[in-house]
Amino acid sequence: MASLQDQLLKAGLADQKKAKAIRNEKHKQRKQQPKGAVQVNETEIRARKAREEKAERDRQLNLKRQQESEKKAIQAQIRQLVDTNKLDRSRGETSYQFVHDKKIKKLYVDDTIADQLSRGRLAIVFVNDHYEIVAEGVARKIIERDAQVVVVLHDRKKDDVGDDDPYAGYEIPDDLMW
């Protein structure tokens, strides 16, 4: 196989004088360089720099994709927690009002759920464009993953005895005077 220079000469695209001048120029360059020195090619430097930039862009893109996949996995975990632990509120007659995104929202729940929501034993979460009611422990697990999902979770008071109230069975008379 003939060299490129021979092929160009044969095709008439280059002449003998130019080919000889280029050969002499390359020979001078090789003679001027000290022994053991590597000839630095500008195109190689640009190509290496382009490869490094592409590798950095690829790393950034992979990092972004990984963060998005982690976010999707967290959202799936939250949806699963809510689906398995949501309370049935279909028979509610009492309206419970709360604020979400600077708007007042209303859910119809029964009296015990409304009481437990106000005491901090239950929480309201916003998942899949729906409001659901879950237990406080589930809401705390959801907060660990994404705090924006939990809309209402009141702090429990230490003096709140709730179901363990020893006087819960006694009614307070209407005519009690202090």
Image (cartoon, rainbow, N blue to C red):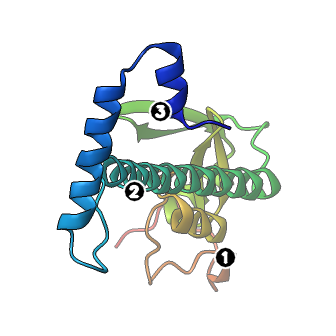
Q: Give the left or right position of residue 2, taking residue 28 as reference.
A: right
Binning the other alpha carbons within 10 Å of mark 1 as few (below 14), some (14 to 19) or many (20 upward) gives: few
User: Residue drawn 73% across and 59% down?
Assistant: 81
Label annotation for residue 122? none
Q: Nearer the viewer, residue 42 or 11?
A: 11
x and y, in percent, of residue 92 in the image: 71, 38
Viewport quadrant of the C terminus: bottom left
User: Residue drawn 27% across and 79% down?
Assistant: 35
User: Residue drawn 79% across and 37% down?
Assistant: 91
Viewport quadrant of the N terminus: top right
Image vertical order of residue 1 relative to residue 13, above or below: below
x and y, in percent, of residue 37 in the image: 28, 75
Report which residue position mark 2 lands on. Answer: 52
Counting residues from the N terminus, which is met first, the one under dot 2 or under dot 3? 3
Answer yes or no: is residue 173 visible.
no
- The part of the image, by quadrant, that contains residue 31 is bottom left
Report which residue position mark 3 lands on. Answer: 5
Helix, strand or loop for disc 3: helix
Q: Nearer the viewer, residue 129 or 108?
A: 129
Q: Nearer the viewer, residue 84 or 133?
A: 84
Report which residue position mark 1 lands on. Answer: 163
Instruction: Give the Cα separation between the discs numbered 1 and 2.
Output: 65 Å
